[in-house]
Image (spheres, helix red, strand yellow):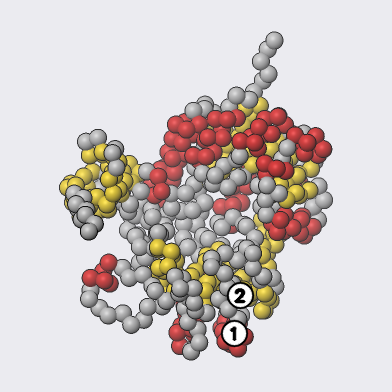
Amino acid sequence: MARKRKPLPILEKVTITDVAAEGKALARVNDLVVFVPYVAPGDVVDIQLLRKRHNYAEGKAIAFHTYAAERAVPFCEHFGVCGGCKWQHLPYEAQLRYKQKQVVDNLTRIGKVDLGEVLPIIGSARTQFYRNKLEFTFSNKKWLTEEQVQSGETFDEMNGLGFHIPGMFDKVLDIHKCWLQDDISNRIRLAIKDYCLQHEGYPFFDLRNQEGFMRTLMIRTASTGDLMLVVVFFHEDRERREALLDYIAQQFPEITSLLYVINGKCNDTITDQEVHVYRGNDHIIEEMEGLRFKVGAKSFYQTNSHQAYELYKVARSFAGLTGEELVYDLYTGTGTIANFVSRQAREVIGIEYVPEAIEDAKVNSALNCITNTRFFAGDMKDILTDDFVHTHGRPDVIITDPPRAGMHEDVIKTILAASPKRIVYVSCNPATQARDLNLLDAAYAVRKVQPVDMFPHTHHVENVVLLEKRPAPSE
């Protein structure tokens, strides 16, 4: 028989002192650091410990004795359950302050480099309805909150359409209203859910047993007014599929791109699936500074369109282009940055792992009559080599915007060998950015640091760093 675990203790009247990683806050009890979500510095709380290690623990607040003076009332009914927007209880000014601190702390503690000029974080003009893309999951086992479970109520309807509960792959929180995307997103999602519940033959997906019909939704909006909906079914049922899609088209004529996917594999990703056009176009158009960008169902595009413009303006400014430079745009995605800076450069070479993204990048150049860009697809460490630089020219400026894991050491070695005058490093993860800056520090000095908030009410922050080549040591 398994030994019963001894319940972990409750820590009483603990003062929360700071924010920490992953959107949590922290407190110190003697020599123990305790991480707690959904609390603010200045709160005095009782903490139920959930996990304890040698020098740190994780817990949850079960009672509040004092609320912090610097607090906001969360505006979303799903706050604290869905796992997103973990900082709604903090005023936006405080969120920005903590994000700036997060960037500086990471770059100094991990990077151990002189930061040069650290500019004030650029906040988002929109703090609600700012996302241009959301994905929702159908599930026949919706998540019940603690209040619902404790109510003793019997729930006959267990179908839900919303977001995955963190750490629960087969549980989905049924979302009533999400404040992240234009309200058309809520209206479309709720209408589809109601239709499926009111008509036979539209079972919500069973994620554990891999059965059902309705699987996921993706909604993309654009600043141009274009609107994309992708409905993903588990298997083909032409009659029911067409009935649903016809209903959607009739109810929401503003949808300019109505698409569907039949995905019968185990995971929800559609990157390897065929996307079918049911009505309208196979893409939507985004616009930025007169440039038009084609965005398909599988395309990567920054999910805060308005703030992406601010981010790209910083990258372009840091690049210091005069029209004479050869620019390498690493991890170019669909070529947004490459095309955005192309007017100020002699030539821009973009490199990206995903072949479909590279094809989109080429289309976006053609769409804007841009002729001084070239794009290459492949693993960055395999494409960006000394031979590549020898063949295509030594870059004057490198702009790099890697994924959260940062850059591979081989890529950094090639950058150092290529020896550009300036490097503009855009990052969504200041911790891995700091690690890479440390590797570049021998040859490059950090001149400017510019945090940019792309995701209000979350702990995530983008950061742009300008590095300039150090003078060669005198003989």
For the question of whether residue 22 can be seen, the reply is yes
Point out residue 183 in the picture as x, y percentages from the top left corner.
49, 70
* Disc 1 residue crowd, few under 14, some 14–19, many 20+, Cα 10 Å: few
Please tell me which residue is depicted at 37% across the width and 78% down the height of the picture. 158
Point out residue 270 in the picture as x, y percentages from the top left corner.
60, 66
Please name the residue that numbered disc 1 is placed on: 237
For the question of whether residue 188 can be seen, the reply is no
Point out residue 326 in the picture as x, y percentages from the top left corner.
77, 38
- Does label 1 or label 2 sit earlier along the sequence? 1
84 shown above or below 439: below
Q: Quadrant of residue 230?
A: bottom right
Please name the residue that numbered disc 2 is placed on: 262
The extreme front residue here reads 1
Please tell me which residue is depicted at 49% across the width and 79% down the height of the picture. 212
Q: Tags 1 and 2 in contact by the CB under 8 Å rule?
A: no
Please tell me which residue is depicted at 22% across the width and 39% down the height of the picture. 29
Q: Quadrant of residue 362?
A: bottom right
Seen in the image, is 109 located left or right of residue 400? left
Q: Secondary structure at mark 2?
A: strand
In the depicted view, which residue is nearer to us: 327 or 324? 327
Please tell me which residue is depicted at 57% across the width and 42% down the height of the picture. 406
Amino acid beneath label 2:
Ile
369 shown above or below 427: below
In the depicted view, which residue is nearer to us: 307 or 275? 275
Seen in the image, is 241 located left or right of residue 415? left
| Picture quarter with the C terminus | top right
| Picture quarter with the N terminus | bottom left
Total numbered labels: 2
Q: Secondary structure at mark 1?
A: loop
Amino acid beneath label 1:
Asp
6 shown above or below 146: above
Which label is found at residue 400? Answer: none
